Image (cartoon, rainbow, N blue to C red):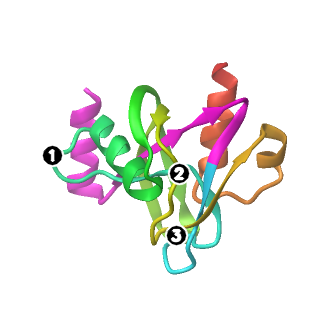
Amino acid sequence: MIDKIVAFLMKFMKVEVAVAAIIEEKGKILLTKRTKSIVDGGKWCLPGGHLKKWEKSEDAVKREVNEEIGLKFKKSKLLFVNEEFVKRLNLHAVVFVYKFDFSGRIKKNWEVKEFGWFARKEIGKMDLAFTHKEMLNKYWGMK
């Protein structure tokens, strides 16, 4: 059912479809800082990105996490779907949010200026990209 809704929205309303990964270790969340040259550049965010046509959301989150920070998939679980409205960017997106367990070491690519592990209290004071703070608040509310 979700697939049909997303397909309809994309075809008629130009709604973006994306994925985001919540990666937690020792009670801290992994965030990446976006390079200045991309949308919402200079802000912290969850690793993730856009789906490619015919790509499953779980495959997209694995690909995006690997491309952005070099981590390999061990296990993932779809937590929820977040509808994202960011009027200042003229953005409407449907975001599949996954809990992501990984192996490997973090490395940066051209989209990622830096990365860090942050506690909930620290994240509460940060200016995150898009609606990623809202997504994290949903995640913490599920625990």
Q: Earlier in the sequence, mark 1 or mark 3?
A: 1
Distance, label 2 to label 1, CA atoms, is 28 Å
Residue 102 badge: none
Question: How far across and down, in percent of the image, does residue 94 sit?
Answer: 40, 45
Q: Earlier in the sequence, mark 3 or mark 2?
A: 3
Secondary structure beneath label 3? helix
Residue at image x 60%, y 49%? 132
Residues 142 and 74: in front is 74
Above or below for 76 versus 107: above
The magenta stretch is 1-30
Secondary structure beneath label 2? loop
Above or below for 127 versus 90: above
Residue at image x 30%, y 39%? 57
Question: How far across and down, in percent of the image, does residue 100 sit?
Answer: 48, 33
- Is 24 included in the stretch rendered in magenta? yes
Residues 115 and 34: in front is 115
Q: Determine if residue 11 is in view.
A: yes
Distance, label 3 to label 2, CA atoms, is 29 Å
What kind of residue is marked 1? Trp
Q: Which residue is mark 3?
A: 89
Q: Nearer the viewer, mark 1 or mark 3?
A: 1
Q: Residue furthest top?
A: 143
Question: How far across and down, in percent of the image, does residue 110 sit?
Answer: 45, 72
Q: Which residue is mark 2?
A: 106
Residue 54 badge: 1
